Amino acid sequence: MGNVGLVFTNADPSAVRAKIAEKKVPAPARVGSLAPVDVFVDPGPTGCDPGQTAWFQALNIPTKINKGQIEMISRVQLLKVGDKVGESQAALLQKLKIQPFSYGMKVTKVYDSGAVYPEAVLDYDDKLLMQKFSFGLATLSAASLGLFYPTKASIVHSINNAFKAILAVTLGTDYKVKQTAAFEAFLANPGAFSGGGGGGGGDAGGSKAEEKKVEAKKEEEEEEDAGGAGGLFGGDDDW
C-alpha cells in the first residue's frame, strides 16, 4: 500500500486535492519495480561508444553508428504499465539520463464530520448532486405511491391524482365543484382562452384580433364595391 499521510485542512477539499496532485518529483526506474506508466525512448544519439552495440541489440533496439557513437533510429517502447523493470532497462534509462517515473501523494479517502468518503466524491459538482437528489426523490415517490404509503415526497402526487379523479367525475356527471369550473369552461369554449397566448400576452392577442376584424371589414367593402361591376353589364336578371 505504501506510505500513508494525513492532511488536515479547513479549505475546500477539491482545491487541496488539486494542490497535492501538482506536487510530484521525477524518479528513476529501479530494478524490480513495476512500471506505473508506459516508458518510451525517442530516437537520437545515446552517448554510448560503438562497443556497446550488442547491449542495445539485446533490448531489440535498432541503432546505427553516427559520429563515433551509437544512435537510436526509431522510437522504442521500453516498458509497459505493470512490467517489472529489468537490469538492462534500468541501465539504459540511467545512461540516457531518463527518469520515467514520478512519485507524489494521492488522495484516496476524505474524512468529514465523522464520515469517511471515497475520493470520487470530490469530483461531484452542484449540478450532479441535484441530479442524484432528484433521482432519489423520484424513486422514493414512486415507491410510496406503489405501496400506498404517503410520504412528504409523494403527497403532492397523491393530491394531484385525487384532483384528477374528481375532475373526471365532474366532467362525466352533473356533479360540479368550483375547483373544476375553469376546466369545464375551457372544454365548452376553447377559443375563449386562446387570445392570451400565455405569459401575459393578452394585449398582443387582442390587438391581433382587432387587426383581423379590420382586414375582414376591408375585404367586405371591396367585395361590395366590385359587386355587379357597377351596373356595367346590367342587372342579374339580364344574364
Image (cartoon, rainbow, N blue to C red):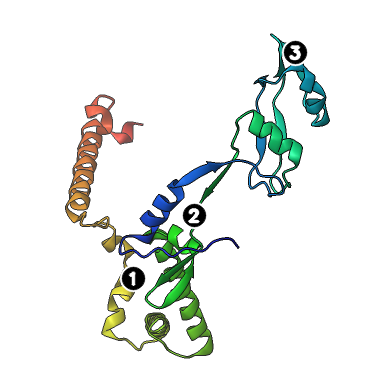
Residue 154 is situated, as x and y percent measured from the top left of the image, at 42, 82
**Residue beneath disc 3:** 65
Left or right for 80, reference 138? right
Q: In the image as oriented, which residue stretches furthest toward the top?
A: 67
State the CA–CA distance, disc 2 to disc 3. 43 Å
Name the foreground residue: 175 vs 53.
53
Residue in front for this viewpoint, 139 or 61:
61
Estimate the x, y position of residue 43 in percent, counting from the top left. Answer: 67, 22
* Residue plotted at (60% across, 40% down): 28
Q: Position of residue 70 (x, y in %)?
A: 72, 17
Mark 2, residue position? 105
Q: Along the polypeptide, which appears first: circle 2 or circle 3?
A: 3
Q: Distance of mark 1 from mark 2, alpha carbons? A: 72 Å
- 66 sits left or right of 3 in the view: right
Residue 54, located in which quarter of the rendered image? top right
Query: Which residue type does callout 3 highlight?
Result: Ile
Q: Earlier in the sequence, mark 3 or mark 1?
A: 3
**Amino acid type of disc 2?**
Met
Counting from the top left corner in percent of width and height, residue 102 is at 55, 44
Helix, strand or loop under label 2: loop
Residue position for label 1: 188
